[in-house]
Amino acid sequence: VLLAVWAVALVSEMDQRLQPAPTFVGLTPEPAYMLSSKHGPVTNIYPYAPDGTPLEGVLLFDQDGRPLRTETQLWWADRCQRQPAYPRAADGGLVEFAYPKSYQLGQVLTGQQCQAEVPRPPVPLPTFPPEGPAPGAPAEQAATTGPGPEASPRPEVTPARPA
């Protein structure tokens, strides 16, 4: 009896080994480097001009010229379904990194209260000083346009060589 149980286990193991292993061709996703903050993933960016004017359709890039990408917002305060609405480039392609992101209202269930457009959140904007000389600066210093003779030249930076 023990020999029969062992033979059945051996045959089932061999049957599993003879099955072809699943292959995953081209399914290695590119790493998603999304923006995040200490509060979690960033899902939208609301750009403003220095005077506080809201900006629309702003394209943002990192230091290497790559577009900044944010997560897609999956939940909403009113619990309504929304889909991203990306603008189209001149060639017809979708521009997924235009900010602020726009969303279209999806299917609304009967009796559900949904906002057609989600308003910008209120944000405190900084105030910038008026352009001109610094407050309290002498008039003759404000009239100069470059460093004075007492200013030292800017040191040159030499990159370190690998050892």
Image: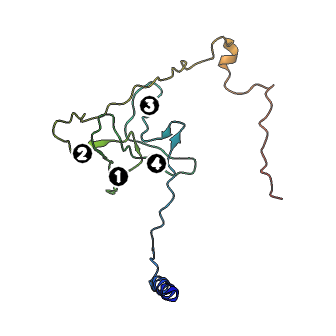
Which residue in the protein does label 4 denote?
69
- The residues bearing labels 2 and 1 have C-alpha atoms spaced at a distance of 24 Å
Which residue in the protein does label 3 denote?
48
Secondary element at image label 3: loop
Q: Which amino acid lies under the numbered mark 2 shown in the image of this protein?
A: Gly
Going 44% across and 83% down the picture, which residue do you hit?
Answer: 19
Q: Which one is closest to the eye, mark 1 or mark 4? A: 4
Residue 17 position within the rendered picture, expressed as x and y whole percent measured from the top left: 49, 83
- The residues bearing labels 2 and 4 have C-alpha atoms spaced at a distance of 23 Å
Q: Which amino acid lies under the numbered mark 4 shown in the image of this protein?
A: Arg
Question: Which one is earlier in the sequence, the residue at label 1 or at label 3?
Answer: 3
Q: Nearer the viewer, residue 138 or 85?
A: 85
Discs 4, 3 touching: Cβ within 8 Å: no
- The residues bearing labels 1 and 4 have C-alpha atoms spaced at a distance of 16 Å
Question: Which one is earlier in the sequence, the residue at label 1 or at label 4?
Answer: 4
Q: Which one is closest to the eye, mark 2 or mark 3? A: 2
Which residue in the protein does label 1 denote?
89
